Image (tube, rainbow, N blue to C red):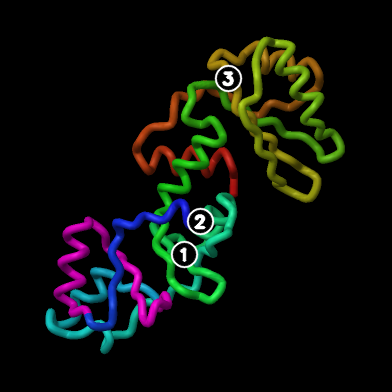
Amino acid sequence: MKSFINPNIPVLKPSDTVDDALVLFNDYKLDLLPYIQDEVFSGYFSEDLLLNYDNDDLLNDIQALPGECVLKEFDSLLEGIRKFMTAQLPLLPVCDEDHRFLGIVEKIRLIDELTTQMGLQNAGGLLEIHLKGRDYSLAEISRIVESESTKILSSFVHAEEEDDLILTLKLDKTQISTVVSALTRFGYDVISYHSSEPVTNIEKDRYEQLMRYLSI
């Protein structure tokens, strides 16, 4: 996670006043900032919370919002995204093994990286296949897809129920009707498919498409 740290996000300290924090919220267009005491992450302060206090009040005298979910410096990319999904926050702190604060990672930075790694930034088709666990063979499905002069850029499988799987494929072609037909001929249940434009730079679009794709 250290490589995803944004060094430009400020942190709040016990010696800061409410006014200091409000200025940072305004300057950086954020409504949540991490609170650090003695190099240890100690929660968050939000703009809404601090608007209830006088400008010259010290943060040391105000109870910070809890922040139990933290990223570890050696967390994987997918583990980082899982923690963001759990925390439902736009940013999370990174801490070392001794719980020392290392910096802040933004959710959108991890989403950007994952969309790049999975090829979601490229135009292409997306399709979903419903199948039983005993019928799952990515090698066989790949063979069928490639027989239609199409390549699988990335894939993800998740379980809907105990033995019901949904396999999502990102393909390198936008016209994938022949692939769908071929899979159907071989008995695969294609439950949805559509052409996918490159992922936009709008956070909502990136987030919703990626989360649907991964079904985390």
Residue for badge 1: 94
Q: Secondary structure at mark 1?
A: strand
- Between the residue at mark 1 and the residue at mark 2, the CA separation in whole angstroms equals 7 Å
Residue for badge 2: 1
Question: Does 182 appear above or below 53?
Answer: above
Magenta span includes 22: yes
The answer to which of marks 1 and 2 sits earlier in the sequence is: 2
- Taking depth in this image into account, of 14 and 169 the one nearest to the observer is 14
- Between the residue at mark 3 and the residue at mark 1, the CA separation in whole angstroms equals 35 Å
Q: Secondary structure at mark 3?
A: loop
Specify the label residue 207 is tagged with.
none
Mark 2 belongs to which amino acid? Met
Percent across and percent down for residue 202 are 34, 38
- Taking depth in this image into account, of 79 and 147 the one nearest to the observer is 79
Specify the label residue 172 is tagged with.
3
User: Residue farthest to the bottom?
Assistant: 61
Identify the residue at image location x=51%, y=56%: 1
146 horizontally vs 136: left or right: left
193 horizontally vs 44: left or right: right
Q: Which residues are magenta?
A: 16-42
Kindly indicate the quadrant of the structure image that contains residue 130. top right
The answer to which of marks 3 and 2 sits earlier in the sequence is: 2
Q: Nearer the viewer, mark 3 or mark 1?
A: 1
Graded by Cα atoms within 10 Å as few (under 14), some (14 to 19) or many (20 or more), the crowding at tag 3 reads many
Graded by Cα atoms within 10 Å as few (under 14), some (14 to 19) or many (20 or more), the crowding at tag 1 reads many
Kindly indicate the quadrant of the structure image that contains residue 158. top right
- Between the residue at mark 3 and the residue at mark 2, the CA separation in whole angstroms equals 29 Å
| Circles 3, 2 touching at the beta carbon (< 8 Å) | no
